[in-house]
Amino acid sequence: MFAVWLVRYLGSKDSSPPAPKWAWPILVLVGAVGMVLAIFWFHRWQDDVRDLMAVPRLGFWDYPLAGLIALVTLFVLVEIGKALRLLVRFLVRQLNRVAPPRVSAVIAVGLVVALSVALLNGVVVRFAMSTINKTFAAVNDETDPDFAAPQTVLRSGGPESLVSWESLGHQGRIFISGGPTVEELTDLNGAPATEPIRAYAGLNSADGIKATAELAARELQRTGGLQRAVVAVATTTGTGWINEAEATALEYMYNGDTAIVSMQYSFLPSWLSFLVDKENARQAGQALFEAVDQLIREMPEAQRPTLVVFGESLGSFGGEAPFLALNNLIARTDGALFSGPTFNNTVWNDLTLNRDPGSPQWLPIYDDGANVRFVAEPKDLQRPHAVWDQPRVVYLQHASDPIAWWNPDLLFARPDWLREKRGPDVSPDMEWIPVVTFLQVSADMAVAVNVPDGHGHVYVRDVADAWAQILLPPRWTQEKTERLRPLLRSDEFLIQNVFQSLVAADDVGGAVQTRSCSAAAARLEV
């Protein structure tokens, strides 16, 4: 159709009539009325969503501020359009010397489009990526005085460790420094505790993903982790971050008789890693699990520890990577916990696509819950009311998590989660509109962690219930789960504004002005 129109356009000599004088005032009036209506609906929709998530409503001044931001954005876009139009007109005047006017116009527009794309790809994107790389590389190398090198042989970066403290990266040092103390474990469990083991290899600890994974496995072996009751293989997000709640809950449930091993494969935030080096997450998850699994298989079967895997967001994607399907996952592990899965999670997608009839996309049931359960809140662990065999797998996912439901298919296809009965924290007024819904969910990803626990991309307290049901730890009770829930945190709440990280940089080298802003840069997870 475009080709037919183009041929007719080039062959026609008719010129478009000028717009009447009254057209612009009418357009301005329609635009003003449209903006007022948009702010009115924005007010209603925001209040509805905030009520669903039990957060305070926006203040009065937030609404005119939204209109002001829209006007500024419109002004910038109009000015860019004017500049491009001037460039097109200049090219048309030059081309009119050698070609008919309409041919000149088509060529000029084509040249401007090609030039714009070339500038975006060759200059703007390259400069942006260079700046981002330098910023997050600086954050990764930053040493926070609040996190000192461990003095125990049971932690990476400490005495006798195979990896240096500096090589662990920013998030690696935070992870190694974290977790409950022996005293805290003893207090909750009422019995003498063991110091938990945490092994970690950073991006700078070895050369390449496979070498880093093998180093992390050897570090696990060095600490005596293979002799613990539980060995957990954690796949990190882009920056090397691990949900502290998932690690801590496991350590409490086994009174410290655990070993958690992980590795860093990037220093970029997950949303960026997913775009530019998603393959690294897959390779890291696969390499680390295979390295640890090989060590365990070399042990006498009666002496092997319980082996589990876990990860959040991009970490859940990497955590699934070693397994072809659910059957393979439950055959090679003793349990798994994946929270906030992404649309590219192979196993999760397969289970959701083949869910039992009548179960919704946002909270499916697969094979009558025989081995895997999808959970938005603790009561869903008993859904359906059927036998739950071991090994057990749990996917924590919220209906309001844009990370879980973002998909390129949103551009031109209505998703089942908007077609079927909706989740409790999804607005009933939300409708699917081609392209618009895709942009809406894409924008929501930037603030997915700025919501209370139990909504969006925040998975903290329900982790305790999930691990308790996955592993059924000996001597663990529901009363202990209730006491544990308030003790859990993910460090996600350190991030309140995704833009703080870039504002915090002194220069393109990424020198960070404050620890709080650098922490924000390091935890821009989606």
Image (cartoon, helix red, strand yellow):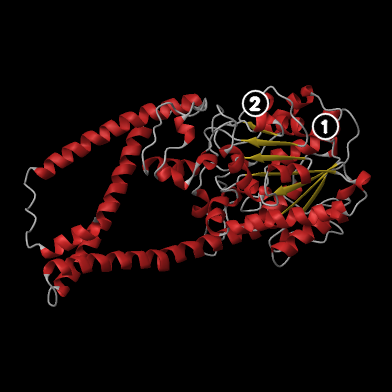
Q: Nearer the viewer, mark 1 or mark 2?
A: 2
Q: Mark 1, residues whose alpha carbon is within 10 Å: few (<14), some, or many (≥20)?
A: few
**Residue 496, image x, y percentages:** 53, 41
Q: Quadrant of the N terminus?
A: bottom left
Which residue in the structure is indicated by mark 1? 473
Is residue 45 visible from the viewing direction of this image? yes
- Residues 218 and 198: in front is 218
Report the amino acid beneath label 2. Answer: Asp
**Residue 63, image x, y percentages:** 35, 33
Q: Residue at x 72, y 53 (%)?
A: 173
Q: Secondary structure at mark 2?
A: helix
Q: Residue at x 45, y 32 (%)?
A: 418
**Residue 234, image x, y percentages:** 72, 47
On screen, 105 above or below 513? below
On screen, 39 above or below 179? above
Reading the chain from its start, which is encountered first: label 1 or label 2? Answer: 2
What numbered label is drawn on residue 380?
2
**Residue 317, image x, y percentages:** 62, 48
